Image (cartoon, rainbow, N blue to C red):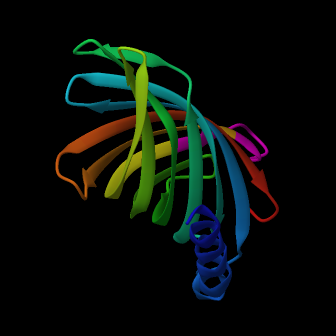
Amino acid sequence: MKTLFAAAAAAAMLVAAPAFAGEVSTYGNLTFNTLNTGGLNLQSLGGRFGVRGQYLGAEAEGSFGISEEDYGGAQVKLSNQYGVYAVAFLPSGDDVDFFVRGGYGHAEVDVSAGGGSVTASDSMWSAGVGGQWFSQGGKNGVRFDVTHSWWDAGGDSDTISIAYVRKFGGK
């Protein structure tokens, strides 16, 4: 499933690239995320890879959990999360971008209690908003975003992310 998901994300980015307005560039993020859902705050580290034109882009992301939280006597940890997003950018000067993004993803959570453990997984639709600032020269930057997710099994969550951004080629 993960391999199929990654292949579909890569194919979507390559097929969509010619439709982007203006010069096409790529970027990568190293992210710290906090997922909040129903009283749980699960932290993760991850990365994103994207392609973009002046106003439109696509990105794939993945992360793995780095914290565990007690929930009703059980220990809960985000095992992994991944997704693909369409992104619309609003450049605001040479060094600042604002954006909205929407996409689909999947997550796995490990739950352990009383000597046993189980892994649960679910998929979700997500939408978010954020901004990024680049240093002079425009290759290195900082990104902040908030993404809301609607889980297929019910419920919702919010993820707050802060990231180091590196542009590769283009503007």
167, above or below 47, in the image: below
- Residue 150: % across, % down: 24, 53
Quadrant of the drawing holding the C terminus: bottom right
Q: Is residue 171 left or right of residue 95?
A: right
- The residue at the point 63 percent across, 52 percent down is 94
81, above or below 5, in the image: above
Q: Quadrant of residue 71?
A: top left
Q: Is residue 99 visible?
A: no
- Residue 26: % across, % down: 72, 63
Q: Is residue 156 left or right of residue 136?
A: left
Q: Which residues are magenta?
A: 132-140
- The residue at the point 17 percent across, 51 percent down is 154
Judge by depth and name the residue closer to the eye, 144 or 153: 153
- The residue at the point 82 percent across, 62 percent down is 169
114, above or below 96, in the image: above
- The residue at the point 73 percent across, 67 percent down is 25
Quadrant of the drawing holding the N terminus: bottom right
Residue found at the very far front of the displayed protein: 115
Q: Is residue 80 visible?
A: yes
- Residue 86: % across, % down: 47, 68
Judge by depth and name the residue closer to the eye, 57 or 34: 34
Q: Quadrant of residue 99?
A: bottom left
Tell me if residue 169 is in the magenta stretch. Answer: no
Q: Is residue 151 left or right of residue 169?
A: left
14, above or below 1, in the image: below
